[in-house]
Image (spheres, helix red, strand yellow):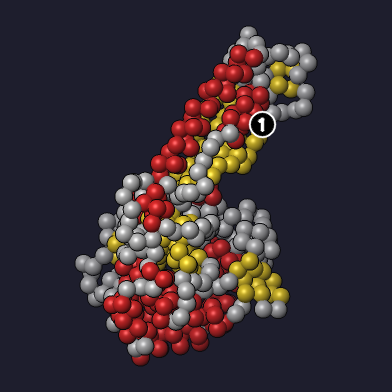
Amino acid sequence: MLRRTLRFTVAALALAAGGGTAIAQAAPAGETASGPVIARMTKLMKSPAFAKASASLEGDWERIVADVITLTEIPAPPFKEAERAKAYAAMLKDVGLADVEIDTEGNATGLRRGTDPKAPLIVIAAHLDTVFPEGTDTKVRREGNRLSAPGIGDDTCSLAVLLAFVRALDRAGIKTKNDILFVGNVGEEGPGDLRGVRYLFNKSKHKDRIGSFISFEPGQGRVTNGGVGSRRYRVNFHGPGGHSFGAFGLVNPAQAMANAIVAFGQMKVPAQPKTTFNVGIVEGGTSVNSIPHDVAMTVDMRSENKAQLEAEVDYLMAALPKAVALENATRSTASGPITFEAKQIGDRAVGMTAPDAEIVQLATAAMNVRGVKPSYGFGSTDSNVPMGLGIPAVTLGSGFKTQRSHALDESLLLDKPSTVSAMQMGLATVIALAKGD
């Protein structure tokens, strides 16, 4: 799931870190990597080994598409990715990765060993889960040069690209210094709250070895090196309830919630760094002629800046008791007052990988060599987790152009030349980061 803004400036980078000192540069000048990095990437991408790897990706086109279809038609609702994880683990084993397993959180992982077991581990990931609930028809439909099905783009197509990367590395005989862990992770979308990648960095057997992270999502020419932070809360309001006529005059939790929504909607937020808020779900009550016992609202707050995100949370927490107190003062509490409980249900860290970091420079250089102008920006992706921990991370486009993400008619374009070219740039970034020969 990527929601991007492409407004990187020096000020934005400083604000994203929540500090007052600007990072040296907003983006590689003119979307160009440094001279030495370009020279290094040019040498790699003109090598006979990379030519073989590129040819592998091109020759694998039909297999990649077939893998996309196979995986898309295995539903992966939030928290129910197990069947797709099982299938993907089998695919990771089929391409020859070592130590293939499904960890206790549900991530499917496989290791491609490098020449230096003491070198930091590099994680290359795409997420297994989709936004669609259990029972959604995920049968793929082909319409001209498009494939359509729920979840086919975000992020199923990237899972197939990762498999193609492994085959290309092996066919070209490319060895890397660093071990590379290929991951199909769970829990990237919405309520999953990045649980798969959180597990990798905080609880997995690999957690102390990971030195850098790349997640792939659909698209071309993008380098997401800023993480939009978010906080989500479900706020429950409880009251005595009663008959709408017979108990009229008693406090009503719906009125208290309405007070809170109005106050929340009056919060002032800056345009830069981009900061947003939303009441996405309101629920509760039993009938039209009953004062409800319980109602609830679910809210989402986001920002490119840590301090602004915390300010949003502080505002909400100050507004809630005032909203409840107003209702308790307006109507009778003879049968009991209104109370509330705010439960945090989502927390994505604000983060940033500096534009002059090696991982960003390499991704930029791979595009420079191919004459592609990269775009930089903030997003809400699996990369938020390592960014928040200070570990170099980016989210890159895996190659497929998609439309209508998160919609039932989600689709991807079968444009082989541009898609394969973008895959080749992504693979070059992986090879260079892993110190491949």
Mark 1 element type:
strand
- Amino acid type assigned to the residue bearing label 1 in the image: Gly
Crowdedness near tag 1: few (<14), some (14–19) or many (≥20) residues, C-alpha within 10 Å: some
- 419 in relation to 274, above or below: below
- Identify the image quadrant of the C terminus: bottom left
Residue extending furthest toward the top: 334
Residue appearing at x 27%, y 56% in the figure: 208
Q: Quadrant of residue 365?
A: bottom left
- 26 in relation to 282, above or below: below
Residue appearing at x 33%, y 46% in the figure: 20
Residue 43: % across, % down: 32, 85
Q: Which residue is mark 1?
A: 284
Residue 84: % across, % down: 53, 63
Q: Quadrant of residue 239?
A: top right
Q: Which is more toward the observer, 434 or 162? A: 434
Residue 293: % across, % down: 65, 23
Residue appearing at x 35%, y 83% in the figure: 42
Say if residue 29 shows up in the picture. yes
